[in-house]
Amino acid sequence: MAGVMADFGNFTHAVVRAIPSSLAKEALRMNVSDVDLEKARREHEVYVGVLKQKLGLEVIELPADESLPDCVFVEDAAVVCGDTALITRPGAESRRKETAAIRQTLKELGLNIVDMSDETATLDGGDVLFTGREFFVGLSKRTNQRGAEILADAFKDYAVSTVPVTDGLHLKSFCSMGGPGLIVIGSSEPAQKALKIMQQMSDHRYDKLTVPDDIAANTIYMNLPGKGHVLLHCTPEEFPESAKVFEKLKDHMLIPVSNMEKVKVDGALTCCSVLINMKAKV
Amino acid sequence: MTTEPNSESSADQQEASAAPQLEADSFPPAAAHSTPVRKEQNGDERAEGGVVPQGNQLEPSQAEEDRTSYRSSTSKLSRSPGGGRSVRSSRNMQCKVTLLDGAVYTCVVEKRERGHVLFDKVCEQLNLLEKDYFGITFRDIENQKNWLDQSKEMKKQIRGAAWNFSFNVKFYPPDPAQLSEDITRYYLCLQLRDDVVSGRLPCSFATHTVLGSYTVQSELGDYDLEESGTDYVSEFRFAPNQTKELEEKVMDLHKNYKGMTPADAEMHFLENVKKLSMYGVDLHHAKLVGSLFECLSPAKGEDSEGVEIMLGVCSSGLLIYRDRLRINRFAWPKVLKISYKRNNFYIKIRPGEFEQFESTIGFKLPNHRAAKRLWKVCVEHHTFFRLVSPETPPKKFLNLGSKFRYSGRTQAQTRRASSQIVRPAPRFERSTSKRYIMSRSLDGAPQSTPKRSTPKRSSPKRSSPNRSSPNRSSPNRTSPNRSSPNRSSPKRSSPNRSSPKRNTPQSVSPRIEPPASFNGAKPTEMGSDLYGRAKGIALSDLITTVTPEKKVEERKAEEEVEVEVEVEVEVEVEVEVEEVEEEDETTKATEISLPSPTSPIRHDTKTELTDTGVDGELTATESDQEDESELKTQDTVGTPEELLKHSTNISELKRSFLETGADSAGLTEWEKRLSSSPLRSPRLDEAPMIEPLELDEVPSQEDEGEDERERAMAAGGSVEEDIKHSPVDTKTTVPKPTFEEMSPELTALLQSARDQTSTRVWTASPAFSQTVFKTTEKVERIVLQTEVVSSQQEKDQDQPELKSAQPEQPDNLENQAEHQTEQLSVLEAPEVLTFNRAGVVDVTHGVPVIHTEMKTVTYQSLEADADPEAGVLMSAQTITSDTTSTTTTTHITKTVKGGISETRIEKRIVISGDADMDHDEALAQAIKEAKEQHPDMSVTKVVVHKETEITPEEGEE
């Protein structure tokens, strides 16, 4: 039966995009670092493989665009919730063109497309945390108030609260959903403060799972038929302490996914896919 | 098929089209949640309960007037008091109440009746038992929507505005499934459908389709291809911007619901709609004042000062929006105090994650009335959803200035009450969603032809009023599928509807009229109106709105002078009985057992117990202490009432602890409250936005109050005896008597009071007589107190069900009391302080209103002055019960002083009535009864208050 809020974490499709060679040198990054392009591509293949083979999602793989070094991070280009896709206006000028291919793909999937045409608005999908009951939008270097407003207009059913993001790139650079009503949060001071703001702003209660490393708090949660709770999270190689914390989630199918190279260009796990539930379509 | 007078529909369209422009990128025009009152005027005088098929009686000129009133509040002010003028001379007033299905219910009430009289009539008409979620709204002369206060006289609330009302949902239950009756859910659904269609409750396309499909199922029953055709839903209104696509999706979904009953469909509707983020949020326009929000990230170079925001009041707390975005939220447990002063509204926040200290946040409302409205709504929502039982006025929390309290039942109480509903599920008629087929220009689309039939039209097809589709003839409408077999009953059949109203003046039975001028009025009203006004004001200097307000007050004053010429003598005797007993600390027993509410104060929408399934760390902790205390109480074993009591006690204790701890200055609670109260004369006051809640303000304020008192008296011109009569003096001179000693004196006092009725004595009104020595605000009360004689507080707490209780039976007392257990969060002296802010304005404008003569003699022991605030409050409760002439208020407070627990039972008995009754005897009887219950009691105070209403001639300057 169709309901206002479809099952949280239930996805059927994923949109991903290949890594361009330009990523190694040109992709934006907050800290200087050298990226091993081949390694990054192998990582990405594993990532896509998990979505496709292990989880059985229908994965749409877009080709890389060399002129868009950050194009692998498709999450920033669109926010999909239910049957609506908000095509963003990324905060970084160099990334604005990334949305075109995503838009086309999502439109072909039959989603209702909402464009962010306001020239003053910026929004990166990485700043958007959807909890299943509401949105939190990080106001960051990449996302502004106007962008958040447009998101609120696009998803009218939900409360949209703004959270200042002072440190880190995106809101989801230090948090993500680890399950229904479960927020995975980094232990840094800015992360904890952001969580408290979110808790204060929310009518709902959330449990939290604190992990020692902020970036390890970026996970991908799904609730798939036949598989139950699924959590893609960091590997013990990357963050041994944080990985241990995830192991406490007994009800989840835990899938460590390496992200060592992409993280050098501020790419977290969620950044590399747009997840869609086509069944939610009315 | 237009039945609407063109003038009105065009007016509506104008309104509607004007509003969106004003707020292009904010909430939709109708975002403000509250549902408006219908605008049609009521011209004719009719027999009680008469049916008025009035769809078309709106005069063009009135429509014009209404329209202009949206534009400017000042034009409204100069308007004549509107409907009901013609009936003014009589004591009765015809009221038109627009019901949730759009029908208009007409009845006659006495002008001086309190709001609940009308409300009860409507609920009876609707066959509604779970009525506490609902309320009646009216539009004041500024065309703003107000909730009719059930405990106040209607006349004093309506003041010159039209006696037209709307029946609306006031408190949206967070979990509609917990309502007991389908009929209640049905009415809630009707409200919500309108909220959705009007845009006050925004939702996505997908949600519109889901909600729409349940609406269709509820109204039409199962999908039937043969009967329905392919466009059977096109007459429904599901959304502000309805498209063909939407209708198709609705039909697609509708096909899946075969066999679903209307009640089930409504339940599904509610289950979906309750999840919407704006469900039950009452929005108010405001501007930020002062400090920057933690969560408000200002745009570059932007000053947070003056940022336009929306305040949303809802079951869980206060939400702050900037445009569509939530920028902060203050759950009720975080809010220590709510106040308003002039056009500013303040909330005082408990120290928390981000604030080390209590902080006060100010908001600027468009005007004083808006601030007061917001404040009232907050107090009411807090009480209804957060508390187990209403607070008594002399309370610390939320107690600022006004005597206003929410006096209805709380959600916990109403749930308990409705769990005891024993009647079989009532059959009720589900009307067609007529309102949705009216022209609505909200979406800007020129839906200019309302689908109503012409007035004279009585085609058989139209037996059901609102289906204009020709292929839906009446037989279809009564098909068994339909949820409402009564649909074509005479009540709603076309003859009635289409006949001009003058043809049916004699109809006596109260009936519901079909909706009258629905045409778009509803959706545009509150939201766009509110928004438009707010914006308009925002453009100009906010201060300028003071001027119209002044006018309003002056007008009010004029109206007050029109009070009937009649003399009433009322004598009121208040006896305070105190019983102090030492108790073991663990004893929780009180004489009157607490009701066992079905649910504790926790909100049901969420689990307060957080999941600790993974590990300790996983648990989200909310710093809220109260919640934690509630949490703890979950573990305690005990009956529901114990649980409840316990949790309340702890939270109340904490609250009082926090409050006393925070302000270390040697202030009494009274002084603190006074100093922070918005009562100081607005004219004199150019105080900072956020009032410093400091000691040094107190003296000056008292002076001010003193001044005001004198001013008022001067204005009244009838001060013959000095205010020295106030209990301060009497109190201090009277020794501590026992009851036996006192009785003769009492009699003497009564006698002397009676003797003096011919003398004009100025003193406090009854409710204040005890507290005069603590506050200087009583004069304002006097101004207000034109006719209300008797203790206001008790009256405020009158509850309908209590009225029906058997009078004078001491045994009954306890039963009655059970209905009305009240909780005190702070220990208070027996004195009750209430002051009325509204009065300030009256006073400072030199209102020549003196209608009453009052005489108060207080006889009080010194004991009452003993410091009861020492020690830590463990629990407090107030029980009020009343019979026809006496009201007994019992305060039971439990404090711990140095390890010894003390239970103090204070009884206050108020006997009120007119001169005919024998007060001495009533008093003696009351004291006797109290004595029987508490042999150890001592009488500490007797107040004799006599009030005489005098003629306007005398009263005027």
Image (spheres, coloured by chain):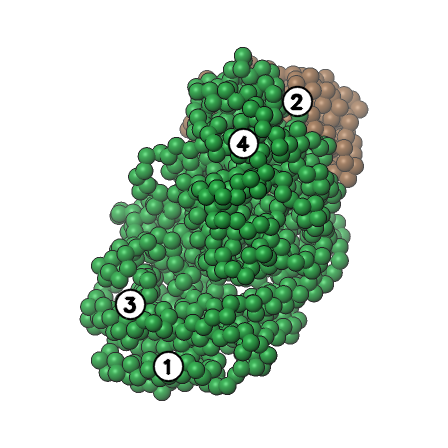
Chain colours: A brown, B green
How far, Cα to Cα, is label 3 from label 2?
Answer: 67 Å
In the rendered image, which residue does mark 4 sit on? B495
Which numbered disc covers residue B244?
A: 2
Between marks 3 and 2 in the image, the one whose residue lies nearer the viewer: 2
Between marks 2 and 4 in the image, the one whose residue lies nearer the viewer: 4
Q: Position of residue B554 (x, y in %)?
A: 63, 68
Say which label, 3 or 2, has the lower sequence index.
2
**Residue shown at the point (37%, 34%) measured from the top left:** B426
Dot 3 amino acid type? Ile
Compare residues B647 and B552 and report the one nearer the observer.
B552
Q: Chain of mark 1?
A: B
Dot 1 amino acid type? Ala
Q: Same chain, marks 2 and 4?
A: yes
Between marks 1 and 3 in the image, the one whose residue lies nearer the viewer: 1
In the rendered image, which residue does mark 3 sit on? B905
Q: Position of residue B357 (x, y in %)?
A: 53, 61
Screen quadrant of the N terminus of chain B:
top right
User: Residue B905 vs residue A175: left or right?
Assistant: left
Q: Residues within 10 Å of mark 3 (few under 14, many from 20)?
A: many
Q: Are marks 3 and 4 in contact (CB under 8 Å)?
A: no
How far, Cα to Cα, is label 4 from label 1?
Answer: 62 Å
Q: Chain of mark 3?
A: B
Q: Residues within 10 Å of mark 1 (few under 14, many from 20)?
A: many
Screen quadrant of the C terminus of chain B:
bottom right
Element type where label 1 sits in the image:
helix
Which numbered disc covers residue B753?
A: 1
User: Residue B881 vs residue A104: left or right?
Assistant: left
- Residue A64 visible, this angle: yes
